[in-house]
């Protein structure tokens, strides 16, 4: 009984109004104008940061992979 949804007292359900394609386009345009777009300098600095961080992570994971590879080869060598 607790699972039943409570209906409005007058028995009528609220209907959602459909948005026309033109109105939708205008709403999207209005929301796009609210975005704080980054400047070219911010974009450039962020791209450089991402590239440097990618290189650091690549070297880190290369080291970890090499270390695990050596450990596995050593363990396999002990079994033979």
Image: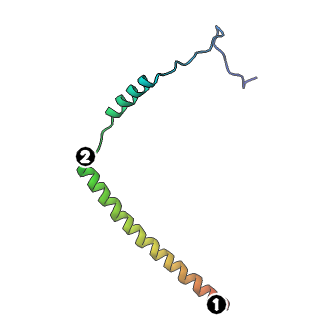
Q: Give the CA separation, mark 1 to mark 2.
A: 58 Å
Crowding at dot 2, Cα within 10 Å, few <14 / some 14-19 / many 20+, comes out as few
The residue lying at 33 percent from left, 65 percent from top is 52
In the rendered image, which quarter contains the C terminus? Answer: bottom right
Q: Residue at coordinates 45% horizontally, 76% vertically from top-left? A: 63
The quarter of the rendered structure image containing the N terminus is top right
Q: Position of residue 51 (x, y in %)?
A: 34, 62
Foreground residue, 10 or 38? 38
Q: Secondary structure at mark 1?
A: helix
Give the vertical position of 66 relative to 38 (above or below). below
The furthest residue to the bottom: 80
The residue wearing badge 1 is 78
Cβ atoms at labels 1 and 2 below 8 Å apart = no
- Front-lying residue, 57 or 17: 17
Q: Quadrant of residue 15?
A: top right
Q: Residue 23: x percent and y percent? A: 42, 23
Figure disc tally? 2
Give coordinates of residue 39: x percent, y percent.
25, 46
Q: Which residue is mark 2?
A: 39
Q: Which residue is drawn at the image coordinates 27% and 55% (left, top)?
A: 44
Query: From this viewpoint, which residue is outermost toward the right?
Result: 1
Disc nearer the start of the sequence (1/2): 2
Quarter of the view holding residue 77: bottom right
Q: Say if 25 sits above or below 62 in the image.
A: above
Q: Secondary structure at mark 2?
A: loop
Residue at x-position 31% and y-position 59%: 49
């Amino acid at each position: 009984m607790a699972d039943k949804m409570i209906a409005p007292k007058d028995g009528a359900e609220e209907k959602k109004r459909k948005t026309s394609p033109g109105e939708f386009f205008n709403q999207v345009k209005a929301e796009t104008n609210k975005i704080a777009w980054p400047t070219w300098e911010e974009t450039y600095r962020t791209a450089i940061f991402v590239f440097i961080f990618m290189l650091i992570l690549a070297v880190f994971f290369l080291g970890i992979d090499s270390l695990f590879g050596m450990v596995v080869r050593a363990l396999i060598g002990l079994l033979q």
